[in-house]
Image (spheres, rainbow, N blue to C red):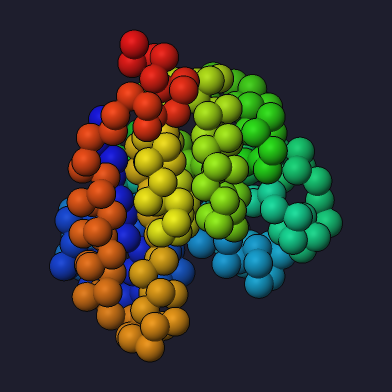
Amino acid sequence: MTFRFYPGLHQPADAQHFDRTCISINRVRGRKKPVECDDVIIDSAAFRELELYGEYRHSVDEHADELYRLWTADVIKITIAVAQDYMCEAFMLAKTGLSIEEHQRLTIERYDALKAALEERFGGQCPFPVMLVLQGYAPYDYVRHIEMYGDRLTPGMWVGVGSVCKRNGDPEAIVEVLTAIHRARPDLLLHGFGVKATALMHSAVRALLYSADSMAWSYAARRQGRDGNSWHEAKAFAMRVTEIASQALKPWQMPLPLWRIAA
């Protein structure tokens, strides 16, 4: 299985320089000019919305309206659109005043509502999938969330794994979460949100992920005195990640569950 990396971009116009990218819905809200890329993940801007406001400023219906407009107006070739999930880090729980279980429930409710709203607007089957997000903090939280989703999680489904971006300094903690999910549902294709360089360079993290997005290139460029908005920085970072990911893993470099499955 080939690892897919989706560089996050500040400017949607820069997508023309990439085979695939991840763009926040907030960056294309109201946009009329086409985004020139054939493989685009539309992120729900969940982290920024909850971090700044403690809630979503746009309802599920508004989110569905914008996705419908972007597709039908030929603005973006949407590969998949991320549902409006609720992160479960302690500082996010403090923002909302809710528990992990409540954030998990709200995440499922928003996923269900978005799917229904899009099907209504398209008069049937939506032409692009909605990415549901597995949420939690401890590994067992994610396993519980899998159980809460029930049969919504279809075999081989491409799903997001939330609340990992603030653990990038400890890739082993990310591996524990991903391994717990894999043990419960080894068929799922996992997408990591906001995965930084330290975690992306960890072989076990990449082995457990089908895909990931990141804007780590922007922070690194700013910290080193370069242009944190330049697509050239994003391109160089993406090429580095892709090159490392293309190197075949040895059995002893693979996470134990995958090694056993491969055997």
* Viewer-nearest residue: 260 or 117: 260
238 vs 16, left or right, is right
* Residue shown at the point (22%, 75%) measured from the top left: 232
x, y percentage for residue 84? Answer: 56, 51
Between residues 32 and 173, which one lies in front from this camera angle?
173
Quarter of the image containing the C terminus? top left
Q: Which residue is outermost to the top? A: 263
**Measured from the top left, where is residue 22 in percent x and y?**
35, 58
Residue at (38% x, 88% y) in the render = 225
| Residue 10 lies in quadrant | bottom left
- Location of residue 76 in the rendering, given as x and y in whole percent from the top left corner: 26, 59
Q: How many marks?
A: 0
Q: Could you tell me which residue is drawn at 76 percent across and 38 percent down?
A: 101
Relative to 102, is 6 above or below? below
Q: Residue furthest right?
A: 97
- Does the rendering let one see residue 235? yes
User: Residue 211, position in %: x, y?
Assistant: 35, 43
Is 42 left, or right, of 166 in this rendering?
left
Q: Where does the N terminus fall, quadrant-wise? A: top left
Left or right of 30 in this view: 86: right
Residue 40 appears in the picture as rendered: no
Q: Quadrant of residue 36?
A: bottom left
Q: Is residue 123 above or below residue 229?
A: above
Instruction: Return the residue found at the far front.
Output: 252
Give the vertical position of 34 relative to 157 (above or below): below
Residue drawn at (40%, 66%), measured in percent from left and top?
A: 215
165 vs 102: above or below: below
Q: Nearer the viewer, residue 214 or 50?
A: 214
Q: State the image quarter where residue 135 is shown.
A: top right
Q: Nearer the viewer, residue 262 or 151?
A: 262
